[in-house]
Image: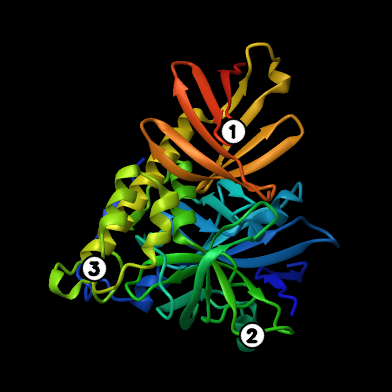
């Protein structure tokens, strides 16, 4: 059966460096609806005036002082209008605030970061890891259906609960896979950009789309916290991030209850290889809480190193005999790099970060045999090695 996804944005024609850590015991970190609601905001976009004026409504979440994270498709109408505007309903203050700036948008991740001066909503804490299958999750947001049923634009947030059915790589747009959470906490148009919380009250995802109700039901999708954390870090935002996996056994040091061969995990961590580490994460038993924490802290550290290295490599580069008009450009996109050379563009996901070099593998365009690249800086030169074809380029930065 064909699986159709529906972006959750509600449209209505109308004339009217390193992340901070946050930890605590499992009891201290229990989900609290008032606390989660204090971080969740409504995002309203107008796309002009006159007969063709429109208003769209979505959701968002405070991730740092004056910073609101939402979906790219929520604010996309703003970019299609010369006189559009974005407003954020600050729940704590009880009135809308005008967005001051769009810090970043990423169509591949369907994420947008907004700067809204003076919001008093409490920044939420990001989870250290995505949830596992059958873990409980809660979705918060402002679905249009609630406004319609109650006959007014409600200030209070709506909440639904469910379970995680799968965590895996999949596409949101046309530019290669990102890590997604499939869950059963019902979301509807208007929930776009709203947070998905785990049982510890930490953000594990941003709700983005749902399956077409005419074809399937109870299938809702959020981008995972691993993508969100790298996206925020790419733009200098330092959200609070838990340093303990949300699990009944997280932090446990009872080695007698932990039956797990840690040798492959140790080797993966020492190699600083996400490609080796990530397949092992799901196989660590929850009874091995200390091992879980070690593995996810290592994963976060490797991703942080990759982002930091690529921030230094970002920009435009050329071969010594090239003009800058024939340049190669490199830009971050969550846990991937977007590269463009001439008319060819591709995405590559990080697979390792070690000894001052980042190794990537192509994910878009999709290829039968993905290429592997290694990037490193040597003085003012960028070295790019295609490990699949044994080709090397030494590039100079374009300036001016």
**In the displayed structure image, the side of residue 341 where residue 348 appears, left or right:** left
Q: Residue at x 26, y 71 (%)?
A: 29
* Front position in the image: 379 or 20: 379
Q: Which residue is mark 2?
A: 217
Q: Secondary structure at mark 3?
A: helix
Q: How is the image coloured?
A: rainbow
Q: Residue at x 52, y 23 (%)?
A: 383
**In the displayed structure image, the side of residue 155 where residue 341 appears, left or right:** right
Closer to viewer: mark 3 or mark 1: 3
Residue 172 percent coordinates (x, y): 64, 61
Mark 3 neighbour class, 10 Å CA radius: few under 14, some 14 to 19, many 20 or more: many
Residue 236 percent coordinates (x, y): 43, 41
Q: Secondary structure at mark 2?
A: loop
Disc marking residue 330 = 1
**Among the two numbered marks 3 and 1 on one chain, the one whose residue lies closer to the N terminus:** 3
Name the residue at the top extreme: 321
Whether residue 74 is situated above or below residue 315 in the rendered picture:
below
Q: CA distance from mark 2 to mark 1?
A: 39 Å
**Among the two numbered marks 3 and 2 on one chain, the one whose residue lies closer to the N terminus:** 2
User: In this rendering, does residue 93 appear at all?
Assistant: no
Residue 347 percent coordinates (x, y): 62, 44
Mark 2 neighbour class, 10 Å CA radius: few under 14, some 14 to 19, many 20 or more: few
Q: Secondary structure at mark 1?
A: strand
Name the residue at the right extreme: 51
Mark 1 neighbour class, 10 Å CA radius: few under 14, some 14 to 19, many 20 or more: some
Tell me whether circle 2 and circle 1 mark residues in contact (CB < 8 Å): no
Residue 277 percent coordinates (x, y): 38, 54
Q: Which residue is mark 3?
A: 289
* Quarter of the image that includes the N terminus: bottom right
Q: Quadrant of residue 148?
A: bottom right
Q: CA distance from mark 3 to mark 1?
A: 38 Å
């Amino acid at each position: 059966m064909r699986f159709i996804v529906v972006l959750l944005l509600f449209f209505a024609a109308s004339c009217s460096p390193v992340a901070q850590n946050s930890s605590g015991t499992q009891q201290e970190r229990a989900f609290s609806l008032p606390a989660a609601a204090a971080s969740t905001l409504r995002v309203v976009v107008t796309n002009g005036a006159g007969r063709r004026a429109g208003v769209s409504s979505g959701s968002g979440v405070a991730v740092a002082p004056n910073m609101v994270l939402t979906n790219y498709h929520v604010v996309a109408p703003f970019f299609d209008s010369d006189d559009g505007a974005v407003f954020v309903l600050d729940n704590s203050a009880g009135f809308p605030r005008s967005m001051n700036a769009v810090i970043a948008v990423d169509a591949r991740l369907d994420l947008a970061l907004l700067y809204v001066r003076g919001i008093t909503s409490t920044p939420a804490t990001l989870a250290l890891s995505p949830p596992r299958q059958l873990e409980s999750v809660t979705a918060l947001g402002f679905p249009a259906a609630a406004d319609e049923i109650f006959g007014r634009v409600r200030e209070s947030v709506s909440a639904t609960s469910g379970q995680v059915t799968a965590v895996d790589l999949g596409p949101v747009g046309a530019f290669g896979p990102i890590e997604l959470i499939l869950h059963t906490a019902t979301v509807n148009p208007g929930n776009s950009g709203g947070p998905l919380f785990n049982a510890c009250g930490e953000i594990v995802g941003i709700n983005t789309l749902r399956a077409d109700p005419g074809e399937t039901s109870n299938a809702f999708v959020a981008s995972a916290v691993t993508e969100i954390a790298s996206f925020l870090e790419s733009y200098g935002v330092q959200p609070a991030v838990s340093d303990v996996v949300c699990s009944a056994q997280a932090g446990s040091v009872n080695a007698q209850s932990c039956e797990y061969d840690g040798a492959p995990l140790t080797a993966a961590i020492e190699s600083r290889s996400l490609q080796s580490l990530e397949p092992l994460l799901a196989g660590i038993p929850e009874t091995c809480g200390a091992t879980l924490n070690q593995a996810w802290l290592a994963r976060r550290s490797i991703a942080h190193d990759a982002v930091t290295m690529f921030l230094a490599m970002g920009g435009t580069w050329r071969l010594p005999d090239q003009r800058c008009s024939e340049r190669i450009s490199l830009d971050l996109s969550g846990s991937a790099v977007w590269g463009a050379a001439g008319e060819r563009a591709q995405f590559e996901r990080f697979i390792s970060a070690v000894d001052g070099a980042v190794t990537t593998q192509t994910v878009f365009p999709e290829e039968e045999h993905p290429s592997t690249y290694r990037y490193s800086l040597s003085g003012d030169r960028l070295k790019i090695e295609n490990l699949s074809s044994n080709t090397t380029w030494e590039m100079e930065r374009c300036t001016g």
